Amino acid sequence: MTPTVVDDAERERVGSEIAAVSRALYERGWMPGTAGNVSVRLPGGAALITASGRDKGDMTAQDMVVVRADTGEEAAPGPLRASAETTIHSAIYRTTDADAVIHVHSPYATAVACRAGRRTHLDSLRIERFELLKGLGLADPTGTEVPVFPNWPDVPRIAADVAGHLAATPQAPPALLITDHGVTTWGRDLAQARNRLECLESICRLLLMIGPGLPAEAKEGVNP
């Protein structure tokens, strides 16, 4: 297999961007402790991802691991290990045109994932009517189905579920939930992936504020 070569200057630049995003999300309480992971696709089939076990509040460009974007395999031996959830990132890179992926444990999306998810099979969360849906870059911003995957202990099994769903559902939104776990979004760069994450987290907050549902008259815009 041809070694994955990454320019040192590019690795430093992208690593610094990932570290800055990780620190900002940590400060918002979305990446507590060592939780969560961020990656960016690099030229030549590689990706740079946050290392496992690193405090996201103290991230630097040196806390990154080069992996193969399509498989998640580490490109070369080193002192750091790639995030345990790297295979989920690679599943997204294989099946979409994403160039950046963010996974966090933001409170509202995680709470919704707990409520909407199932332990043994894929489910989905129907979201409609929210103006914030436009922030997800959907072909039809009036509504979408966000997949909610089982939180299998074997992470590659989650990744296989994600790859299968995204390959079979090209119109899927650039976001997913994992039961009892958290939320993942992606985009053409870190800024877009972060913006989509913020929109989905805000939508989930609103869903929890609204509760199980509105009266039928309110849904139809008819005054009681």
Image (cartoon, rainbow, N blue to C red):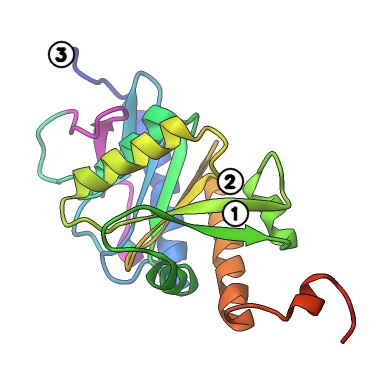
Q: Residue at x 15, y 13 (%)?
A: 1
Segment colored magenta:
57-75
Q: Where is residue 32 in the image (x, y as percent from the top left)?
A: 33, 71
Asked whether the beta carbons under mark 1 and mark 2 sit within 8 Å of each other, the answer is yes
Question: Is residue 68 rendered magenta in the image?
Answer: yes
Most common SS among magenta residues: loop
Q: Choose between 191 and 139: the one closer to the eye.
A: 139
Which of pointers 1 and 3 lies earlier in the amino acid sequence? 3
SS at mark 1 in the image:
helix
| CB under 8 Å between discs 3 and 2 | no
Look at label 2 and name its amino acid. Gln
What is the x, y in percent for residue 54? 23, 59
Q: Residue at x 71, y 43 (%)?
A: 140
Q: Earlier in the sequence, mark 3 or mark 2?
A: 3
Q: Which amino acid does label 1 sit on?
A: Asn
Q: Name the residue under label 2.
A: 192
Residue annotated with mark 3: 1
- On the question of residue 12 being in view, the answer is no
In screen coordinates, is 52 left or right of 208?
A: left
Question: Which residue bears the numbered disc 1?
Answer: 195
